[in-house]
Amino acid sequence: MLGKGVECCELSPFATPEPGPIRHSVWIGNIQELARESSKSMLVRIPSLLSSDQVAHMRGVLERSDWVDGKLTAGPQAKRAKNNLQVPEGAPAARALAETISDALAKNERFTSSALAQKMSLPLFNRYDVGMSYNNHIDNALRSMPGSPVRIRTDLSATVFLTDPKDYDGGELIIDDTFGAHAVKLAAGDLILYSATSRHRVAPVTRGSRWSSFFWIQSMIRDDSARTMLFELDCTIQALRAKVGDGEELLALTGLYHNLFRRWADA
Ligand code: NI
């Protein structure tokens, strides 16, 4: 939170031309758009969470991994919707890759500021080959940690894209919120962070194979709109500081951020 950079407000439009009712998000291009969109649920892109070398390394490891039917880890309702492959949760190679993702998240100011993470699940890995998809569902509210009695409340869902969008067709992550459906298909190494309360799906892959990592976060700020407002306030403070420098007003705004945080935080 309140990191040094101003990059937390720079979001490029999501790619993915798609016919029909899907709304192509141009969300968060600048501060004015942030203000207009302040009531929407959290949907944050973290560009280049992983470098291209890290993505290439992960893909190499995953190519040599075992893959099992994703239905094995799905509840009875999700079983009917889910058609993909996953690396088994306890696989040692996947654990090492998960650590790389956790380390990258710990260093990423935009993730820190937006997620305000308290706990997160172990990153897992999945793939959708031609014909595979995951129909509409809402993620379970609680997630067990393998080998531990600890459970996390899933406030935020996260997907790290591990395939270049040129290498597959379909496979968009489609997230519904009160403003409609957002189709998300990002560069390899980018992460999308979205409210776990959202209904979402993965469109069928029609060419190639879509690989990704996914995990959940319990935030210090449980309420999605409160967390989104804090993120926007943080972004605005950073942008204002870059424009006009520090001063009494910025000090007051920073104090307001921390006092709201204190009021709302579970931590
Ligand atoms: Ni899901």
Image: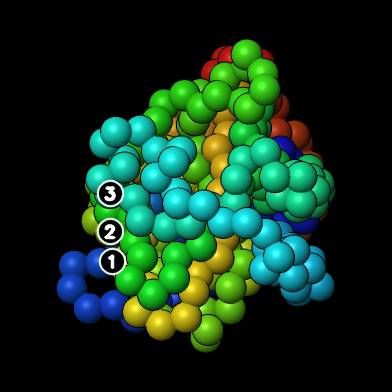
Q: Residue 234 is drawn in which quadrant?
A: top right
Query: Whole-percent x and y of residue 259?
Result: 64, 20
Residue with the mark numbered 2: 181
Q: Quadrant of the N terminus?
A: top right
Q: Residue 190 is drawn in which quadrant?
A: bottom right
Task: Work out which residue is located at the far bottom of the displayed protein and give it.
Answer: 166
Mark 2 residue element: strand
Instruction: Classify residue 79 as left or right of residue 192.
Output: left
Mark with earlier residue (1, 2)? 1
Q: Nearer the viewer, residue 26 or 80?
A: 80
Q: Disc 1, disc 3: CB below 8 Å?
A: no
What label does residue 81 carry, if any?
3
Q: Residue at x 67, y 59 (%)?
A: 65
- Determine if residue 203 is in view: yes
User: 10 Å neighbourhood of mark 2: few (<14), some, or many (≥20)?
Assistant: some
Q: Residue at x 80, y 48 (%)?
A: 96
Question: Is the residue at mark 1 in contact range of ligand 1, meaning its CB lies under 8 Å from it?
Answer: no
Q: Disc 1, disc 2: CB below 8 Å?
A: yes
Mark 3 residue element: helix
Instruction: Classify residue 111 as left or right of residue 165.
Output: right
Mark with earlier residue (3, 2)? 3
Amino acid under disc 1: Arg
Amino acid under disc 3: Ala
Q: Disc 3, disc 2: CB below 8 Å?
A: no
Task: Give the spatial CA distance, label 3 vs label 2.
Answer: 18 Å
Amino acid under disc 2: Ala
Q: Quadrant of the C terminus?
A: top right
Residue with the mark numbered 1: 23
What label does residue 63 carry, if any?
none
Q: Please, is residue 173 above or below residue 187 in the view?
A: above
Mark with earlier residue (1, 3)? 1
